[in-house]
Image (spheres, rainbow, N blue to C red):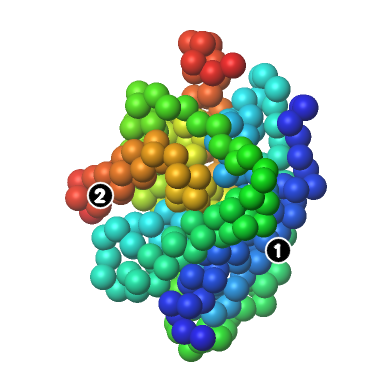
């Protein structure tokens, strides 16, 4: 596990958790990003608030990338194959809305609420994610 | 402080947390999903840290009638574990494994100005709209 970064992962995770706390404490809503995204794309109620949350989600990283550490290269390694990107994006959008949540909605908010559904959902999407990566590796797509 | 300002601030903090945690890099997320080769367990610490920060506050706040801004506390309705939950989350995991992006990091990735992110987000929006129009 030469890429293992538990300290920064834990600190980043706690910051994410505090954002979810702030959002819930003030607005009374749970910060599930797939739900916020769906709302921003389709709903009229609270649409501006949801769009602003998503804009914040871009401003936060920009602040770190371009103001806090402008000399450090941005580590963003992603496939540029449309064969992965297009079905990947579609399944993430379709699947999270059909299943009622994503890594934040089920994985953080749901497990934090001790929701059994969210625990099952999280175990399931991690499992199918692992299987998908394993198959791609066998096909030589990923290392 | 109104709902819109607080939504923006929450998003900024969430995005900063994502960068610090390393989860804005799809390769790192794929490292977590790659259990047979160079496994990177960092994602467990991200999720664990977030849950540890959120859970105690949630149980303190959940029985309040209204939020600090006077809004209704909105909790998901109790649901049975049904086909939608199982099929939906299973498909989400496949998409996650194909690219290494879930919704939060996908949106945060716009900050990199890599145009491939826009293709991913348009596909993701198409998936959201497809679900909304096909399945009631």
Image location of residue B18, percent across then percent down: 61, 52
Q: Reply above or below: A67 against A46.
A: above
Query: Seen from this angle, which residue lies furthest bottom?
Result: B70
Q: Nearer the viewer, residue B127 or A82?
A: A82
Q: Chain of mark 1?
A: B
Of residue B135 and residue B45, the one placed in the foreground of this image is B45
Circle 1 SS class: helix
Q: Secondary structure at mark 2?
A: helix
Say left or right for B3 vs A14.
Answer: left
Query: Which residue is at the far top?
Result: A139
**Mark 2 — residue?**
B129
Query: Which residue is at 19% across, 50% downward?
Result: B133
Circle 1 crowding by C-alpha within 10 Å: few under 14, some 14–19, many from 20 = many
Q: Residue at x 60, y 41 (%)?
A: A74
Judge whether residue A108 can be spotted in this image: no
For the residues beneath circles 1 and 2, the answer to whether they share a chain is yes
Q: Give the alpha-carbon distance from disc 1 to disc 2, as whole Å.
A: 33 Å
Give the label on residue B53, or none.
1
Residue A122 in which image quadrant: top right
- Total marks placed: 2
């Amino acid at each position: 596990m030469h890429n293992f970064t538990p300290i920064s992962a834990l600190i980043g995770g706690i910051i994410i958790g505090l954002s979810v706390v702030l959002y819930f404490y003030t607005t009374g809503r749970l910060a599930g990003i797939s739900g916020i995204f769906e709302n921003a794309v389709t709903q009229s109620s609270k649409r501006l608030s949801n769009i602003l949350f998503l804009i914040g989600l871009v401003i936060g990283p920009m602040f770190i990338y371009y103001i806090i550490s402008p000399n450090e290269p941005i580590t963003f390694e992603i496939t540029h194959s449309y064969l992965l990107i297009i079905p990947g994006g579609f399944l993430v959008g379709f699947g999270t809305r059909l299943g009622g949540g994503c890594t934040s909605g089920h994985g953080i908010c749901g497990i934090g609420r001790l929701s059994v559904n969210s625990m099952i959902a999280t175990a399931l999407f991690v499992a199918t994610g692992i299987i998908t990566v394993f198959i791609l590796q066998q096909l030589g797509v990923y290392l | 402080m109104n709902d819109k300002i607080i939504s923006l601030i929450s998003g900024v903090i969430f995005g900063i947390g994502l960068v610090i945690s390393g989860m804005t890099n799809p390769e790192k997320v794929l490292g977590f999903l790659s259990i047979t080769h160079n496994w990177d367990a960092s994602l467990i610490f991200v999720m664990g840290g977030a849950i540890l920060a959120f859970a105690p506050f949630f149980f303190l706040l959940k029985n309040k009638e209204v939020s600090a801004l006077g809004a209704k506390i909105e909790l998901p309705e109790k649901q049975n574990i049904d086909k939608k939950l199982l099929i939906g989350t299973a498909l989400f995991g496949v998409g996650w494994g194909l690219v290494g992006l879930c919704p939060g990091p996908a949106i945060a990735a716009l900050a990199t100005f890599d145009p491939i992110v826009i293709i991913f987000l348009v596909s993701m929006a198409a998936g959201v709209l497809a679900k909304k129009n096909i399945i009631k």
